[in-house]
Image (cartoon, rainbow, N blue to C red):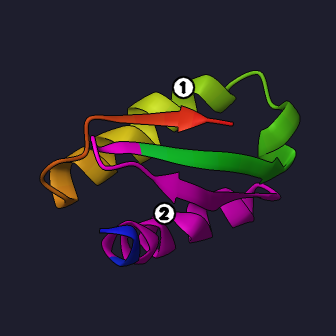
Amino acid sequence: MKEKVEAALEKIRPSLQADGGNVQLIDVTDDGVVKVKLIGACAGCPMSQMTLKAGIEKMLKEEIPGIKEVVSV
């Protein structure tokens, strides 16, 4: 499943990189929790939680069955 998540994140990376940020996949747990680290401009952005939940989490849940939640570590 980790490979599927990484492939899906590649689709959203250009949007994050356009604003000087990026996302790094840390882990995917057996119970469907994706752990990511927002880096670059995303790390200190006040909108980062919205990006995480409304952007990254929503897209991953739509593309990969079994994803329950995306959390920032």
Residue 54 lies left or right of residue 65; in this view the side is right
Residue drawn at the location 47% of the way across and 66% of the way down: 9
The amino acid sitting under disc 2 is Ile
The picture places residue 4, in percent across and down from the top left corner, at 31, 73
- Please give the residue where the numbered disc 1 appears in the rendered image: 50
Q: Nearer the viewer, residue 66 or 51?
A: 66
Magenta segment includes 21: yes
Circle 1 sits in a helix, a strand or a loop, which is it? helix
Residue drawn at the location 53% of the way across and 33% of the way down: 71
Which mark, by number, is residue 2? none
The amino acid sitting under disc 1 is Met
Q: Nearer the viewer, residue 26 or 58?
A: 26
Please provide the residue range marked out in magenta: 4-33
Residue 4 lies left or right of residue 27; in this view the side is left
Above or below, 30 relative to 4: above
State which tag comes first along the sequence, 2 or 1: 2
Circle 2 sits in a helix, a strand or a loop, which is it? helix
Which mark, by number, is residue 12? 2
Graded by Cα atoms within 10 Å as few (under 14), some (14 to 19) or many (20 or more), the crowding at tag 2 reads some
Residue 59 lies left or right of residue 62; in this view the side is right
Q: In which quadrant will I find the N terminus?
A: bottom left
The picture places residue 47, in percent across and down from the top left corner, at 67, 25
Where, by quadrant of the figure, is residue 63 drawn? bottom left
Q: Nearer the viewer, residue 55 or 7?
A: 7
Above or below, 50 relative to 25: above
The picture places residue 62, in percent across and down from the top left corner, at 17, 50
Residue drawn at the location 69% of the way across and 48% of the way down: 37
Q: In which quadrant will I find the C terminus?
A: top right
Q: Residue furthest front?
A: 30
Magenta segment includes 7: yes
